[in-house]
Image: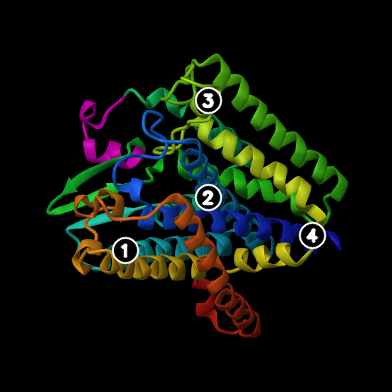
Amino acid sequence: MNTTKARITSIDMLRGIVMVLMALDHVRDYFHYDAYFFDPTDLTQTNPALFWTRFVTHFCAPVFVFLAGTSAFFVGHRRDKKTLSTWLLKRGVWLIFVELTIIKLAWYFKLDYASTLLQVIWILGLAMIFLAGFIHLPRKLTIALSVMIILGHNLLDGISATDTFSPVLWTFLHVFNIIQVGNINIFVGYPIIPWVFVMPLGYYFGELYLPSFDARLRVKRLWQIGIGMTVLFIVLKFVNLYGDPYFWSAQKSLSFTIMSFFNITKYPPSLMYLLITLGPAIIFLAMAEKWQGTFSSKLITIGQVPMFYYIVHIYLIHAFAVVAALLTGFSYSDMIIDVWVTMQSDLQGYGFSLGVVYLLWIVLLIGLYPVFSWYKCYKQANRDKWWLGYL
């Protein structure tokens, strides 16, 4: 396999893996009995199978945001910076619009704006808008600023929204919270800091994949970066002083102590969270440089249609959840969501075992794969249709 092809396929493969894992998380949200009673990372109530099911899905958002920056680098390599900025601005605004309309409808099954959910697509769009400006700053300044904020933003953890002159602004910046703006409740799941500073690092990460960059040196650098981030996580987590609001502690058993060690904060993403997700993801890129095979090709296919996959799988999961609710004694209205499905108190008592969740996840992926494969071929055969670039 030539360098260019290996480079593209390894990145698409990684994206495909995290998208598959993302579907597992969403199936769990809509179908798991315990999801309506407690968080899977709550060590006082969870179990190892449930905890690690949730842990592996932590990789999704950081890899999405990071690789979106890398994809922007590939686009920019073929264009001047002004053209790239325009592309990023258009793409960013479009993604925020999609979050507030198409994806909102998928999660809620209603389109009123009494409540609004800002999740990963929103932050991808906002990060692209920021990146449109970052690319005009000196490279070293952008990297230094991004690293500094990612390393240091946990110093802000002790500042609550009510401690600031503008609770609404501070929530958007660095708090996982529901805020009220006028008559609208806004659920800020993905605040600005540090998410928008992950994408610029992904952007300059793309330099490793320039045609002029030696393939063997690239793999070496990938190993160095990935292992370095993972080791930094282990060291900082072990000393238990900084990097995550949650400190680990000895538990009732070794397995739960290990779970405590890897219990990391996603909302907003702590330094520990980003290190232990992006570090192993970069290690994977080092290993997958020349991987081939049927299973790999299927992951690559999924990784090449991310937006289409994201939209379709949410609608289908929610639709089947409605059917499951009706078949188990609940009503259609119980699946019309107000904020987030697991916060729907009327759904307590609904759901299935974790084993059933995994079965539904596998059936979903097998059933939808031909659709994703068709769409990939359709995009490739219709490159003249500009609108396909937004889906």
Residue drawn at x 44%, y 26% is: 154
Q: Quadrant of residue 211?
A: bottom right
Q: Is residue 379 left or right of residue 315?
A: right
Q: Is residue 351 magenta?
A: no
Q: Earlier in the sequence, mark 4 or mark 1?
A: 4
Q: Earlier in the sequence, mark 3 or mark 2?
A: 2
Residue type at mark 1: give it.
Lys
* Residue under label 4: 6
Q: Earlier in the sequence, mark 1 or mark 3?
A: 1
Q: Nearer the viewer, residue 166 or 198?
A: 198
Label 1 and label 2: CA atoms lie apart by: 19 Å
Residue type at mark 3: give it.
Phe
* Residue under label 3: 261
Q: Quadrant of residue 14?
A: bottom right
Does 387 appear above or below 2? below
Q: Is residue 167 magenta?
A: yes
Label 1 and label 3: CA atoms lie apart by: 34 Å
* Residue under label 2: 60
Q: Earlier in the sequence, mark 1 or mark 2?
A: 2
**How far from the left and from the top, in percent, is residue 135?**
57, 50
Q: For numbered disc 1, what is the local secondary structure?
A: helix
What residue range appears in magenta? 159-173
* Residue under label 1: 104
Residue drawn at x 20%, y 29% is: 162
Label 4 and label 1: CA atoms lie apart by: 36 Å
Residue type at mark 2: give it.
Cys
Callouts 1 and 2 close, C-beta under 8 Å: no
Label 3 and label 2: CA atoms lie apart by: 20 Å
Residue type at mark 4: give it.
Ala
Q: Counting other residues with Cα less than 10 Å from the Cα at mark 1, is it few (<14), some (14-19), or many (20 or more)?
A: many
Callouts 4 and 1 close, C-beta under 8 Å: no
Q: Nearer the viewer, residue 182 or 7?
A: 7
